[in-house]
Image (cartoon, rainbow, N blue to C red):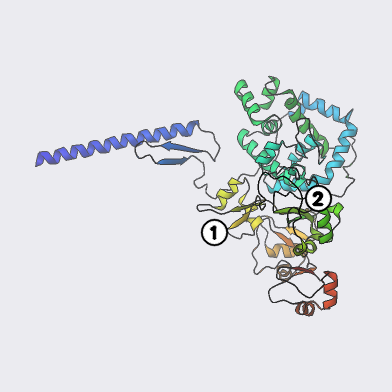
């Protein structure tokens, strides 16, 4: 009996020792993997166990919990120290201030129409606003610019890259020519490039020459220094001039007075506050102008991506840009719109335009969804008016911006970090009760990115049980006056309808 007990104890101790060695081996293996993977916080290493065939995921992030982590914010477009003294940069500064002076001034003026809206979108996506100068060099802010390689639009997207980042191109639409949608796409692309190279010089080079061309240069030159690779001529000649052009353009544009340029002034007014309106498709701009009471010229100006002045028949619904001051009036006339019959050959059946939304699935979190669409959690919450991080399976979340307001707008304020309703009330000298009334707020909760009306709107949203009689009594307007302002032939109204008061 004694011998049996001793034998069992020996086996147990040996087993424990074996497990300890095994655990140490697995730990050292994981450490070795951790040492060779990139420093990207999103990196996940899969270790396959042959024993139980279960995939184990090891996340080597510096942060303990990445489930709800927001994507990083890059606040400054920084280049290597002394880049302004680089020979190529200086040669471009000299060119722009001499032979290219007139053209540079024209681009300064033309870009002024788009500068604020482009910079706002970049900032919304956590990117430096000075990436504006990439588009400055790419297209000179010619909306329908086309290169010899068939790149198009303000950001000069190739068709494949544009499609990868959500831009639709067919015989009727080319969203590369939409300054707003293409800026959102460029923001997502630039975030990916910077996260890959951790250098703005290399990220911009990849934007111009392609990711694999730059990666190949890094491997051949055994360096991640753009200027070193450029000196060795391992990147294309066009790209060796591309980054210096951006550096030179930014420097001159920010110091226009010092270099004798005129103050940037656009011939056209800067972009107004805009909202997206979902309309049935296909439908022509002529019909939209007639039914919504808008000018076709205005619709064409802010929807330059509609190649034939008609939305694509490949979608059964489509979102078009409407200046905010006309938005509620247009929305109140949506019930008058019907898709038009046109002759076309479709490669696929008509479908709703759902690219702007995401349906929450099991296991999703705001952090996971924001990482998927490369946006900050606050931006995602702002788009969907979420006051907490709680979401539900099947919930429909907006993942693209639906409104663009100028920072100088007097009637609308975008909530910033640290804001409260009382602070905003004091800042604009508006009673909190009025702020809540103007924005249909049930309590004092507001969130970063939310747009607040700073004055009472001239429209009323019809609720269930409303009638023209009750609305006229509430606002002290006659039924005839309300019908006249809203071009109503009868007294019939419906919930959700926007009435001009």
Q: CA distance from mark 2 to mark 1?
A: 35 Å
Is 78 positioned to the left or the right of 219 in the image? right
Question: From the viewer's perspective, is residue 372 above or below residue 149?
Answer: below
Say which element carries label 1: loop
Is 277 positioned to the left or the right of 394 in the image? right
From the image, which quarter does the N terminus lie in?
top left
Q: Could you tell me residue 373's position as x and y percent? A: 62, 46
Is 442 positioned to the left or the right of 134 in the image? left
Q: Could you tell me residue 223's position as x and y percent? A: 62, 24
* Res 84 quadrant in image: top right
Give the mark nearest the N terminus, 2 or 1: 2
Q: Using the image as rendered, state which of residue 379 and residue 31 is in the foreground.
A: 379
Q: Residue furthest top?
A: 232
Q: Could you tell me residue 303's position as x and y percent? A: 79, 49
Question: From the viewer's perspective, is residue 481 above or below residue 139?
Answer: below
Residue of label 1: 392
Q: Is residue 249 visible?
A: yes
Q: Could you tell me residue 409's position as x and y percent? A: 80, 57
Question: From the viewer's perspective, is residue 387 above or below residue 245?
Answer: below
Q: Residue at x 55, y 48 (%)?
A: 368
For label 1, the crowd category at 10 Å Cα-Cα, with few meaning under 14, some 14 to 19 and many 20 or more, is few
Question: From the viewer's perspective, is residue 325 above or below residue 399?
Answer: below
From the image, which quarter does the C terminus lie in?
bottom right
Q: Residue at x 54, y 35 (%)?
A: 39
Is 175 positioned to the left or the right of 212 in the image? right
Q: Is residue 257 visible?
A: no
Q: Residue at x 56, y 54 (%)?
A: 360
Residue of label 2: 302
Say which element carries label 2: helix
């Amino acid at each position: 009996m004694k011998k049996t007990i001793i034998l069992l104890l020996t086996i147990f101790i040996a087993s424990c020792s074996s497990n300890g060695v095994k655990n140490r081996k697995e730990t050292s293996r994981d450490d070795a993997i951790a040492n060779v993977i990139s420093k990207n916080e999103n990196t996940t290493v899969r270790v396959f166990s042959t024993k139980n065939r279960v995939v184990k995921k090891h996340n080597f992030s510096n942060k303990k919990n990445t489930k709800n982590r927001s994507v990083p914010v890059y606040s400054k477009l920084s280049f290597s120290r002394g880049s302004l003294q680089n020979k190529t940069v200086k040669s471009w500064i000299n060119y722009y201030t001499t032979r290219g002076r007139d053209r540079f001034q024209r681009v300064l003026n033309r870009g002024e129409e788009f500068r604020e809206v482009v910079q706002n979108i970049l900032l919304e996506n956590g990117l430096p606003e000075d990436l504006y100068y990439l588009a400055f060099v790419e297209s000179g802010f010619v909306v329908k610019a086309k290169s010899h390689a068939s790149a198009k639009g303000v950001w000069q997207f190739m068709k494949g890259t544009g499609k990868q980042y959500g831009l639709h191109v067919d015989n009727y639409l080319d969203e590369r020519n939409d300054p707003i949608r293409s800026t959102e796409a460029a923001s997502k692309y630039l975030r990916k490039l910077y996260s890959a190279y951790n250098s703005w010089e290399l990220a911009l080079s990849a934007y111009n020459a392609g990711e694999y061309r730059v990666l190949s240069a890094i491997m051949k030159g055994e360096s991640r220094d753009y200027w070193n690779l450029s000196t060795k001529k391992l990147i294309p000649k066009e790209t060796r001039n591309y980054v210096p052009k951006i550096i030179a353009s930014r420097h001159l544009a920010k110091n226009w007075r010092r270099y004798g340029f005129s103050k940037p002034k656009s011939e056209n007014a800067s972009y107004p506050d805009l909202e997206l309106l979902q309309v049935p498709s296909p439908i022509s701009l002529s019909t939209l102008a007639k039914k919504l009471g808008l000018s076709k010229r205005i619709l064409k100006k802010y929807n330059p991506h509609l190649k034939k002045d008609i939305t694509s028949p490949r979608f059964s619904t489509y979102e078009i840009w409407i200046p905010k001051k006309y938005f509620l009036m247009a929305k109140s006339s949506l019930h008058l719109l019907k898709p038009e019959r046109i002759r076309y050959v479709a490669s696929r059946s008509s479908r709703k335009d759902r690219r702007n939304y995401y349906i929450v699935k099991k296991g999703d979190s705001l952090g996971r969804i924001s990482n998927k669409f490369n946006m900050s959690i606050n931006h995602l919450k702002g788009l969907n008016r979420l006051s907490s991080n709680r979401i539900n399976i099947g919930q429909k979340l907006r993942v693209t911006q639906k409104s663009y307001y100028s920072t100088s707008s007097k009637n609308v304020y975008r909530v910033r970090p640290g804001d409260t309703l009382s602070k905003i009330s004091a800042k604009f000298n508006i009673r909190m009760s009025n702020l809540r009334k103007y924005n249909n707020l049930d309590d004092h909760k507001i969130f970063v990115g939310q747009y607040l009306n700073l004055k009472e709107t001239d429209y009323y949203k019809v609720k269930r049980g409303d009638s023209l009689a009750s609305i006229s009594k509430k606002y002290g307007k006659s039924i005839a006056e309300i019908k006249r302002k809203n071009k109503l032939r009868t007294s019939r109204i419906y919930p959700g309808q926007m009435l001009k008061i």
